[in-house]
Amino acid sequence: MDIAFIGLGKLGFPCAVACALKGHTVHGFDLDTALVDGYRRGEVTPFEPGLPEQYETCKARMHYCRTLDEAVSKADYVFVSVPTPHAPMHDGSFPYDGVARNFDNSIIERALVEVGRAIRNHAGDGRFRTVLVISTTTPGTMVNELGPATVRAAGRPIGDGWTMVYNPFFIGQSTVVRDFLNPEFVLLGVPQDEDGLVADNGRGEALARELYGTLHAQPVCPMTWTEAECVKLCYNTYLGLKVVFANTVMELAHKLPGVNCDVVNATLKLAKDRLVSPKYMDGGMADGGPCHGRDQMAMSYVAQKVGLTFNVFDLINHGRDAQTGWLADLIQRHAKGRPVVLLGMAFKPGTNQTQGSPAILLANILRNRGVEPVLHDPVIRPKAEFPHGPAIYFISTRWEQYKDFAFRPGDTVIDPWRMVTSVPAGVELVRVGGGDATDTAATDDASVLARTEAKPVGHLRAAS
Ligand SMILES: NC(=O)c1ccc[n+]([C@@H]2O[C@H](COP(=O)([O-])OP(=O)(O)OC[C@H]3O[C@@H](n4cnc5c(N)ncnc54)[C@H](O)[C@@H]3O)[C@@H](O)[C@H]2O)c1
C-alpha cells in the first residue's frame, strides 16, 4: 500500500519505518528539511533502540517528498502526526498554575487544511484517500474544528473520494515501532454526520481495518471521533491518576513508621479481581457501602494527621459528593413538578445494606434541596407506594428487575447504569452518559462547552 506520513518526528518516523518494515511504500513529508535531509543520509534522529537497524533494512521503501501535496498525491492512506503542543510553561515541566488550557491546535489545523487542499487538487485521480489523524486532540476538536476545516479545504464532503479517521496511538516514547506493531487495540474514530449516521458509509473503518490487517491481528475498536478522543486522553490521564495514588502510598509510608511502600503497592497489585481489573470502571452511582465511603473519610483523616502533601482521599470524598449532586441536578431539571422516585436503596444489588449507600446519599442531597423522594427497593422496601400520576424514576441501585419496571406514559426514567434499553411509548428515557440523550439538560454541560468554543461549522455532508 502507498502510505503518506505528514510529520516525521518522534512518532511519525518510527511508525513510517514500521509500515515500511511490513512491505508498504512510504511517502514522507516534514516541514523540517534538515530533519528529512538527515533521514535521506540514513541518520535516524528519534532515539529508539533498534530503530537505525530497522530503518536500514527498509530504507528503500521510504521516499521523501518535497511538498505535502506530493506525498498526498501518491498515497491511499495519509497519516498526520504533527504536534499539538502546549506552551513550554504548561507541558508539565513547570508547576501547574491552576489555569487549565487546551492544546494549541494551530499546527494540526494548518497541516490538515493542506491535506484537504491536496485532496481537492488530486480529486478524480481514481484514488480513495483515507486521512488518519494520530495527533492528540481534546474531545470535540475533530468534530468542531479539524473535521470541518479539512472538509472545507477539500471542497467535497467526507465520503466523496476521501474520508477521515481519528486514530490516536497508545505508544511509549522510544518503543514506538514495537508498540505500533503490537498495540493493545486500535482506535478508529470514524466520522458521523449530524443524524448520527456514519458519514462515509463505513468506508474509513473498512479501509483502516484493511491497512491494520497487514500490520497485526490486534482488536480494532470503531467509535465516533469524539469517543476516540476521549479514550486517548482518558487512557493517559488514568495512568496519571494511578501514579498519584502510588505516590500517595509512598509518601504515606515515608511518614508512617514501619511501612514500606513497596510491600503495600506490591500487595495491592495482587488484587487482580477488583483493583487491577476491569471492575469498577463502568460509570454509575458513587462508590459506597459499609466500608468504602467511611474508609475514604478515615484515610483523609490519616492524610491530614501525617501531613500528606496532596490529600487524594479528600478529593475522592468531594468527588463522590459532587458527582451525586450532579445526578440530583439532573433529576431536578427533569422533574418539572413531578414527584421523584428513587428505585433502589441498597448500596449494590443483592444486598439489603444501606450503610454508605450512594442511593441514600442522593436521597439526602435531594432532601436538603427540599425534594422528598419516594424510596423503593425490591428487598428493603418492596411495598413503597408509587405516585399515581406521571413521575420521574431514577434507578439508584442496579437491581436487574428495574429493567422491566412498568413505566407509564408521562414518566421520565433516568438510568445512570444504562441498563434500560427500551421503554413504552410516551416514556422519556435518559441514559446518563449513554451518548444518546436527547434532553438539553444532559447536553448543556461539556458538549456545549465544546460547541461554544468551536468556530461555526457547516454540515459535514454539505460542505462547500
Ligand atoms: N511521541 C509519541 O510517542 C506520541 C505518542 C502518542 C501521541 N503522540 C502525539 O502525536 C503528535 C506528534 O508527536 P511527536 O512526538 O511525533 O511530535 P514531534 O514534535 O517529535 O514531531 C512532529 C513533526 O511534525 C512536523 N510538522 C509540523 N507541522 C508540519 C506540517 N504542516 N507538515 C509536515 N510536518 C509538520 C515537525 O517538523 C516535526 O518534525 C502529538 O500530538 C503528540 O501528542 C505522540
Image (cartoon, helix red, strand yellow):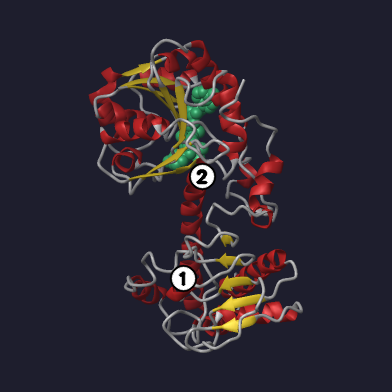
Please tell me which residue lies in front, 20 or 331.
331
Q: Secondary structure at mark 2?
A: helix
The image quadrant that residue 315 belongs to is: bottom right
Choose between 236 and 288: the one closer to the eye: 288
Quick check: 151 above or below 272?
above
Residue at the spot 58% in from the left edge and 32% down from the top edge: 146
Proximity of marks 2 and 1: CB atoms separated by less than 8 Å: no
Q: Which residue is mark 2?
A: 229
User: Does residue 346 lie above or below 187 as drawn?
Assistant: below
> Where is residue 391 shown, x and y percent of the image?
65, 72
Quadrant in which the N terminus appears: top left
Q: Earlier in the sequence, mark 2 or mark 1?
A: 2
Place of residue 123 in the rendered image (x, y in percent of width and height, measured from the top left):
47, 13
The residue that disc 1 covers is: 404
Give the residue drawn at x 59%, y 71%: 394
Q: Amino acid at mark 1?
A: Asp
